Structures are given as C-alpha cells and as structure tokens.
Amino acid sequence: MRINKVHIKNFKNLQDFDITLDQDKMETILLGPNAVGKSNFLEALVLIFKFLDLEKKPPFDYTIWYRVKEKELKVEYEDGRYSFYKIEKSSDLLFGDQPEIRIKDFFKHKDQYLPKYVFTYYSGISNKLKNHFDDHQKRFYDKAKETGITKNDVEDLRRLFYVQLIHSYFVLLAYFSFTEDEKSTIKFLKDVLSITDLESVLFVLHRPTWKGKGDKRFWGASGLVEEFLQQLWKYATAPIYDLKATLKIDFRRNSKRDLLYLFVSNKANLQSLATFYNSNTDFFKALESTYISDLIEEVRVKVKKVNVSGDITFRELSEGEQQLLTVLGLLRFTKDDDSLILLDEPDTHLNPLWKWKYREYLKDVVKRPESTQIIINTHDPLVVGSMVKEEVRIFKYDKELNKITAEQPDIDPKGLGVPGILTSELFGLPTILDKETQTDLNEKRFLQGKLLRQGLSVEEEERFVKLKNSLDDLGFYDQTNDIWYNRYLAEISKNELFKKVEFTDEEKVLLEQESKKVLEKILTDESNENK
C-alpha cells in the first residue's frame, strides 16, 4: 500500500487541499505548527478507507491515488457518487489511460483494492479518532462472540485497527509466549526497555452488560472468547469469584461488580496456554477478544527488570515504555503486505535517545514489508534527523492562497543536526538560543560591526565591553582573523534589523536583500583592490 496523491475538497480546515507523497519511500513525516491540518489529514485517510470498506458514503469529497497489490488506483468521491479507476502508467511515469472499475465490482473485490490493514495510533486524549473505528470493532465483536466460532474462523484482525494502551499488555504476553519466534524482540525488550522476563499475569474479569448462552463460568461467553477463557481456565491457579466487589471509580463514587480472578502464576503456564494457538497473532486476537467483549476489568502483568529488586507490574512502567511497546509490538504482530500505518505523535512520551532511534526501531523491530506505508505526524526534530527531503512534508497556512498547503522541503534534514533542523524551514525557529541571550549576542555583534567600521561612543563602548564579558563566560568569543567575516559584520550591522531576533516575512525578505548587497559590495571592493 503506497499513497501517491490526495486531494481533499472540504474536510475541516483542509479545503481544496492537495498533497503528493513519494511512493518509493516507506515512511513520510508530517511537520508543521499546531492547527495546520496534520492530524486532520490522518483522520481524513482513516475516513476514506473506513467508508470504502463499509461500502458507504463519506462526509466529504476527495480524490486519492494509491498503489495496492501491484495495481495503481484512483478513487474519487464527488457529489454523492464514487468513481473507481485503474491507472496505467507510461514510461515517464505520467498518468495514462484510466479504465473505470464498476462500483459493484470494486466493492465485490475490495480485498484486492483496499489496504490489508489501516493501523492508527494517536497519543492525545481526544476520542475523535477512536470513535471512527467503532463500526469495525463491532463487526469483529459480533463475529468473535458467535456460538461455535473458533480461532480458525477469525483469520484476520479488522481492516481498520485503532491501537490503545490495553494492547500493550496483550503484546507483552504474546512476546513471551512465543520466545523462539521472537528472539530478536526479546533482546529488544532487554536492551531497550530493560525487561528481562515475565513473572506472572492476573486476568481480572467482570460480569459483562450482555447475557450469553455460552459457558456459564464466564457469564455465558461464547465463540472465540469462550474458547480462550476455557483454555485460560486450565492453566489458572485456583480461579476465584468475588461477587459484588467494591471498585473505586473516583474520589466520589464506588461501584459494585462481580469479578473473576484467573491467575497464571508463571511464564511456563502462559506458554502452555499459547500452544493452543498457531501464532502470536492468533494468540493476540484471542486476548483482545476478551477486551472487546467487555469482560476485562484489568490485566496485571508482572515483569522482571534490570536493576529492579523483585518484580513490578506493567502498569508501573513509564508512559514512554508502554507507548513504545504498544506501537512497535502491535505492528510487529501484523506485518502484512499492503498496510497503511498512521502514527499521530507516537513519540510524545519517549526520551531523546528513543526519539533519535525511533526509525531504527521501526526498521529493526517491526521489519515492515516494502509494500507497507507509514505516515507519522511529529513535532520532534530528533525523529526526522536521518530523513531525506522526499520523506518529509511541511504543512503550513498560505496567506496568499488562503488555504493549507503541504510541500516537500528544499533541503534534507539528514546531516543538519538538531540546531540546523530547528532553524531551517522544517521548524522555522529564529534561533536555538533563549531570546534574551540571542538579543544580547545580536547587540554585541551590531556594536562590534560599528567598532570595525567607525568606532564607538563612550556609552556604546561600555555596553560592548559588558556584553562581551558576559557572552565570553558563555563561550561566545569574538576573536577572529577572518577578514571576510569582519568585513561582512561591519557592513551588515549598518542595518538596525541586525539586532532583532524575530522577523516579519517582509523583514526576512529585506534582510536577505541587504545581505546579498553586502556580499556583492565586498566582492566588488576586493576585485578593485586587486587591480
């Protein structure tokens, strides 16, 4: 699955919006300030494929070009009607003839025309994205709880999958249940997260809101859920019911719930339970079915960590540790071809080292196939430091066009370093210094230029010495034998703008023009001196 181009006519602040991605790149990073449509673009992609899969009409008009299963497609929705095309590409890669696909045939064979999975992770607290996945979650839920349904009848996860923190528990259990298949991942857990082993797991189940006709031990659960819980029961130590248990909701309220505790006391028992399943993905689906079926009150996973005496619960791990394991783990288990991965600020809680290595983790741990596409929305320069410009799109509001645009930068982030990335067009910071220090530095350079040019007044010289001494203490020395720098400084400092830190668009243009004039004057003077 590789998206080439999207046109969105009218979705939130994306009005007449166009974006082109590089189909040869697996990853694309979206940059830009807040409220310029990055998250809205990811949300729009979710809605596009959601309504295509549900065979329903979306809430906005759009056109999308993408490649899936070696077919180039164009999907258009306008004025309440879908149009589908197969695109032939000529030798110069321009779009050629577009044979139309009948609407009925597209939906009949949609597995050939849609991505295998659309995985979405959002680190924020809003449920605006999560709610878009309700229809697919319900469809999976309805099938998983049907009487007689087993692990062999639920082949795939749902096409649209929203990643939540609860999944991190299931991911961790699946990792340690299939250690032979996950040797590299177990090493990752130890080296990066300092998790050396799994100690035990306690499933706390509660009576669901529905009434079933399945196994009475589990309040009538049936289907895939019943099958899993029956296997879990075999390996649980002394299952305990706690009827009308008091649970704290918040400081104001408590709730009475019927609970069932199923305790798996060691990793060996968990691995014995997992042998019932064909793969870690099958095991993960079974684990998740209990959550979707409203049976899970809590999962308490105890792990062993380096330099930690005794064991700790998974909940005690930091948000960054849980976040990293959740995203990377779930992608690892679902590394199918032709998937679309949408990650909205997946680096929020990560430390700088993990942010710096995030793409490395995606490559080494997840090992996505070449036909998968990953689109990441981030505000962190560490994440983009190893990327080339074809992998980056900058979102911004264009005042002249009165709309949001998304363009490829002119330079590669790779090799710029964090200061260079922050002060380039990628982030647009005027300086990496605090404003007060930068203002002092600019004033010192302004006075230094004037000193080189014509000399200073007594007051200016006192101010210059004071600034020089304080900045010398910070390591900003001004000793230089560079004649070209001194000439440039002397000339450019004639302009009062040289003392500013932040500039309007007009001032940026003016300062650039002045800088060019100074360089031209220096070169002309040098040429005349050599004659």
Image (cartoon, grey):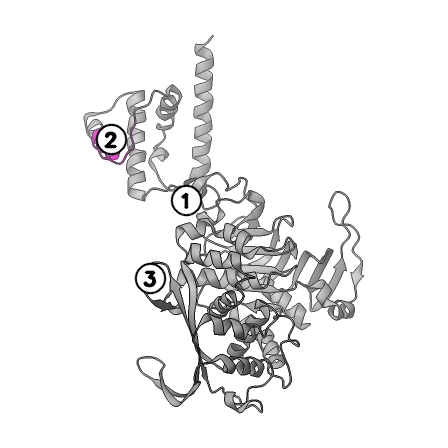
Q: Which residue is mark 1?
A: 429
On the image, which quarter does residue 64 sit in?
bottom right
Within 10 Å of disc 3 (Cα), the crowding (few <14, some 14-19, many 20+) is few
Within 10 Å of disc 1 (Cα), the crowding (few <14, some 14-19, many 20+) is some
Tell me the element at label 3.
Answer: loop
Q: Is residue 463 left or right of residue 150?
A: left
Within 10 Å of disc 2 (Cα), the crowding (few <14, some 14-19, many 20+) is many
Q: Is residue 113 left or right of residue 157?
A: right
Whether residue 111 is visible to the viewer of this picture, yes or no, is yes
Whether residue 398 is visible to the viewer of this picture, yes or no, is no
Q: Which residue is mark 2?
A: 468
Tell me the element at label 2.
Answer: helix
Residue 260 position in % (x across, y down): 44, 85
Q: Indicate yes or no whether the magenta region holds residue 474.
A: yes
Tell me the element at label 1.
Answer: loop
The N terminus - image quarter: bottom right
Q: Which residues are magenta?
A: 463-478
Cα distance, mark 2 to mark 1?
Answer: 25 Å
Choose the circle earlier in sequence order: 2 or 1. 1
Cα distance, mark 1 to mark 3?
Answer: 41 Å
Residue 239 position in % (x across, y down): 44, 85
- Residue type, label 1: Leu
In the foreground, 482 or 300: 300
- Residue type, label 3: Val
- Residue type, label 2: Lys
In the foreground, 391 or 427: 391
Q: What residue is rendered at 36% in x and 81% in y? A: 249
Labels 2 and 3 touching (C-beta < 8 A): no
Labels 2 and 1 touching (C-beta < 8 A): no
| Residue 308 - label | 3
Closer mark to the observer between disc 1 and disc 3: 3
In the rendered view, would you say 4 is above or below 414? below
